[in-house]
Image (cartoon, rainbow, N blue to C red):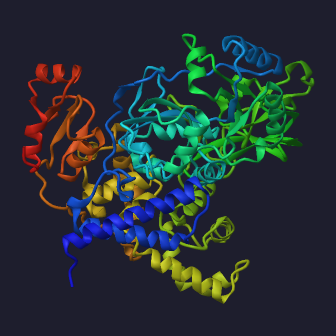
């Protein structure tokens, strides 16, 4: 019996509440009560009901965390309250001086501090109105930042709607840090290394780069996290102290530091610094200090601020832990696209609790900047407390017999000539048949996000290629004709061979998007592959697409379009695809059918100013659901502009270009929502 709309609405509300509660218990309390499989079942039930009744979808539904279309650019937004930096110090004497200034400023009144770790992430402001997330923005210059709402909505521990008593404040701006947890950062960097792609130097740079992605789906897959540390505009203010307000935050589902603590004296502060300097390396988030703030809001107001810093807060920064060792030699790693990365082999040294034997030198420009040579005494640090890197050379102690680190003229694997990217910093092997490159490409082809062939790890890839069993991707699908040769490989018994062949056979049915992602097309990852597959549906259509047709897809720029077209029309690319098709690999993707009418199909729409009945995110989502594309800037390709109050320069540009401008009421009429 079909479910009625009334029953569906009730069940959807129940599922959303239950999922939000589980998100709160998992991400805020760190106390999960159900298995991942059961959580996934609840999400799947909610998705199916929303697919069946699309008009019941709301922007704050848990299913809406991952946005649909990539952004065209980031709009600038003005902070209601400036996002000031915090003054910092590296020594205890200056911390005591700060405390003395606070005491004088408060005229002898008693005061307390709140203190928590200074997370080394990206400062952002989240704005909630009546309990719903309506805006997320970067700090920018402190007055104006980038609107990154769509990207932040994909971060799992950021609540889209607050829950509990007292959450419906007219305005609540929560400030904090978006960061990349160490385990997730290491996992992602390892995957990039396996793909032959440059790795991120540290979690902070990685998080900052991720938030600048124009495709929210890329943000979602990187597992960033948020922790609140301060506030902006709040109306009305529900508490007198930071510590009281942050207890409310935790109850409402806003992630706060589990290490937040109240202290009364500067001596307690210094004792805390000594304790944290020892244990910070064991945390799952990058931290470079502790932040001390006056607890009472009225005392903060009394102390005031300078033009740059509040006078009621200070950050104590830890010195980065470093070690001195000898750079013994340099080896060169070859990635799947031929990128050659120099890696320093070091005299083993203890750093931040682990023994370090090697460190990435990133590229040859970095070697030149450091002026480093083989045999040098070097200082190493763990970037973001994780990745060892050479940061300085002790040139005064340089031995007489040091040797320069020269870029290899030949690939260390196949001896083919190397070339430097035009205008770039990367050195590459020029031989597409290089065994080292092919091994990396094969590992990538079989990885979980591509063809998902379980059991094909680094050790098996080495054997398959070295013994000549696999010389192309299509050779994987011919292994079923040679089971006896597989039995001759290390750790491959009959059961292992059967499992491997079964996984290879199953991979033939993967959708086109997975195959496109697996082909190692330069610059094409999972998200871009999905865009291509959903747009063209068949491999033949993708191959026949012109650069202009590729450029018309939101999220694909000139360089990416050129890379896709060159690979798919090249002799090598066509041969790879033809061989896979002959092996029985699927070359199609089911067409994505829109839900309901599409009155804005093919239209490019700009929204500017403040609207009465929509938040910016809500109207962008509505435009996308009705077939249109919400873009951030006016151009000759804009179909029309929706103008609210205080529209700004976009309205002037639309008028100058002769672009149609409509108000909110007219937009609602065209969207089928009535007046």
Say whether residue 320 is left or right of residue 573: right
Is residue 225 in view?
Answer: no
Tell me what residue is drawn at x 57 percent, y 11 percent. 306
Quadrant location of the C terminus in the rendered image: top left
Asked which quadrant contains residue 548, the reply is top left
Q: Quadrant of residue 513?
A: bottom left
544 versus 668 height, above or below: below
x, y percent for residue 38: 49, 73
- Viewer-proximal residue, 433 or 239? 239
Q: Residue at x 53, y 44 (%)?
A: 248
Q: Quadrant of residue 592?
A: bottom left
Task: Decide which of 266, 433 is in the foreground and name it.
Answer: 266
Report whether 184 appears left or right of 382: left
Q: Residue 357 at x, y = what percent?
A: 83, 46
Task: Name the residue nearer the viewer: 575 or 105.
Answer: 105
x then y, percent, for residue 233? 44, 28
């Amino acid at each position: 019996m079909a479910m009625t709309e009334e029953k569906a609405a009730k069940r959807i509300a129940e599922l959303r509440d239950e999922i939000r509660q589980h998100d709160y218990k998992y991400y805020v309390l760190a106390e999960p009560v159900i298995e991942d499989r059961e959580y996934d079942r609840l999400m799947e039930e909610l998705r199916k009901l929303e697919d069946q009744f699309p008009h019941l979808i709301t922007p704050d539904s848990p299913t809406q965390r991952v946005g649909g279309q990539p952004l065209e650019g980031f709009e600038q937004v003005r902070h209601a309250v400036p996002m000031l930096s915090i003054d910092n110090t590296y020594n205890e004497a200056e911390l005591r001086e700060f405390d003395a200034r606070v005491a004088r400023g408060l005229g002898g009144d008693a005061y307390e501090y709140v203190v928590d770790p200074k997370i080394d992430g990206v400062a952002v402001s989240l704005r909630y109105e009546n309990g719903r997330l309506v805006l997320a923005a970067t700090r920018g210059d402190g007055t104006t930042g980038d609107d990154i709402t769509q990207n932040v909505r994909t971060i799992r521990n950021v609540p889209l709607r607050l829950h509990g008593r007292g959450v419906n404040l007219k305005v609540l701006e929560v400030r904090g840090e978006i960061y990349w947890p160490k385990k997730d950062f290491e996992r992602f960097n390892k995957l990039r290394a396996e793909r032959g792609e440059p790795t991120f130097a540290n979690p902070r740079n990685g998080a900052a780069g991720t938030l600048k992605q124009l495709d929210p789906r890329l943000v979602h897959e990187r597992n960033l996290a948020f922790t609140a540390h301060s506030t902006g505009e709040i109306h009305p203010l529900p508490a007198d102290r930071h510590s009281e307000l942050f207890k409310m935050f935790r109850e409402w589902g806003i992630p706060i530091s589990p290490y937040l603590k109240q202290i009364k004296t500067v001596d307690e502060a210094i004792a805390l610094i000594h304790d944290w300097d020892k244990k910070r390396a064991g945390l799952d988030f990058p931290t470079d200090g502790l932040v001390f703030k006056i607890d009472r809001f009225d005392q903060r107001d009394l102390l005031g601020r300078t033009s740059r810093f509040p006078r009621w807060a200070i950050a104590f920064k830890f010195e980065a832990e470093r070690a001195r060792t000898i750079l013994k030699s340099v080896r060169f790693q070859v990635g799947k696209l031929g990128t050659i990365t120099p890696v320093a082999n070091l005299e083993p040294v203890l750093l931040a609790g682990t023994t370090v034997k090697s460190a990435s030198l990133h590229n040859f420009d970095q070697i030149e900047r450091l002026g480093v040579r083989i045999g040098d005494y070097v200082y190493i640090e763990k970037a973001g407390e994780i990745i060892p890197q050479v940061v300085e050379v002790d040139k005064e102690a340089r031995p007489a017999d040091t040797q320069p680190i020269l870029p290899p003229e030949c690939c260390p694997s196949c001896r083919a000539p190397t070339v430097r990217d035009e205008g770039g910093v990367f050195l590459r092997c020029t031989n597409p048949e290089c065994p080292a490159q092919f091994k990396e490409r094969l590992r990538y082809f079989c990885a979980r996000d591509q063809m998902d062939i379980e059991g094909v790890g680094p050790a098996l890839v080495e054997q398959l290629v070295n013994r000549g069993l696999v010389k192309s991707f299509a050779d994987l699908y011919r292994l079923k004709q040679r089971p006896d040769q597989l039995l001759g490989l290390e750790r491959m018994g009959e059961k292992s061979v059967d499992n491997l062949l079964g996984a290879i056979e199953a991979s033939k049915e993967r959708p086109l998007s997975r195959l496109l992602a697996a082909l190692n097309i330069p610059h094409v990852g999972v998200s871009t592959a999905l865009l291509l597959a959903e747009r063209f549906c068949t491999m033949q259509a993708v191959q026949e697409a012109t650069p202009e047709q590729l450029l018309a897809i939101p999220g694909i720029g000139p360089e990416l379009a050129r890379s896709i077209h060159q690979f798919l029309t090249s002799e090598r690319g066509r041969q790879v695809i033809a061989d896979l098709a002959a092996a029985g690999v699927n070359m199609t993707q089911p067409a994505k059918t829109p839900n309901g009418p599409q009155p804005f199909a093919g239209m490019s729409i700009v929204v500017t100013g403040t609207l009465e009945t929509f938040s910016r995110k809500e109207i962008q989502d509505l435009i996308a659901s009705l077939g249109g594309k919400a873009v951030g800037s006016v151009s000759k390709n804009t179909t029309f502009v929706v103008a609210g109050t205080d529209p700004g320069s976009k309205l002037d540009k639309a008028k100058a270009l002769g672009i149609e401008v409509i108000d909110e009421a007219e937009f609602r009429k065209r969207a089928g929502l009535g007046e």
